[in-house]
Amino acid sequence: MQKVKRLASDRYGRQIKVAMSAFAIVREHTAQAEARLEAIYRSADEQQIKYFQEQIDPNVVAHNKLDISQTIEANLGLSAQLVGDHYTIINRLKEYEAVGVDLIVLKFESMLEDIIRFYKLVISEYTQQNSLIPL
């Protein structure tokens, strides 16, 4: 992504921003987050999964490589692998930042409860480590 960003800037004077969609599950311990994910898999609606699979574009390479676990959440959000404790999530976010991702749109199972947990466990720690000001 960095190469494409440089090319766009150098050749065309344009600035490219990269965003991605992700589903996040953060808990105090990775085993807790993984257990929650397993519970989501067990409670998955087979008809909903079938519908999603029928809607995906077969010409998109990422869609051709899906396994059943990735089709449980729309927009392939589980592919981002943001499931775990705060150390796991922060390290993953840093990896995305390093390759040029500028923005991650997060989705949660329980929006209010999980966004508060994500802020307390991940964002506050991440901003302290990186001297960033949260938006």
Image: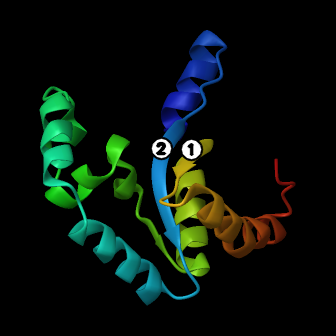
- Amino acid type of the residue tagged 2 in the rendering: Ser
> Mark number for residue 21?
2
Say above or below: 60 vs 92.
above
Please tell me which residue is depicted at 23% across the width and 50% down the height of the picture. Answer: 71
Q: Nearer the viewer, residue 68 or 47?
A: 47
Left or right position of 127 against 79: right
Question: Which SS class for mark 2?
Answer: strand
Count every numbered label the image shows and give the total. 2
**First along the sequence among labels 1 and 2:** 2
- On the image, the x and y values in percent for residue 99 come to 52, 50
- Amino acid type of the residue tagged 1 in the rendering: Val
Q: Nearer the viewer, residue 80 or 110?
A: 110
Tell me, yes or no, if residue 131 can be seen here: yes
> Mark number for residue 105?
1
- On the image, the x and y values in percent for residue 108 come to 51, 57
Tell me, yes or no, if residue 65 can be seen here: no
Left or right position of 51 against 83: left
Say above or below: 128 vs 34.
above
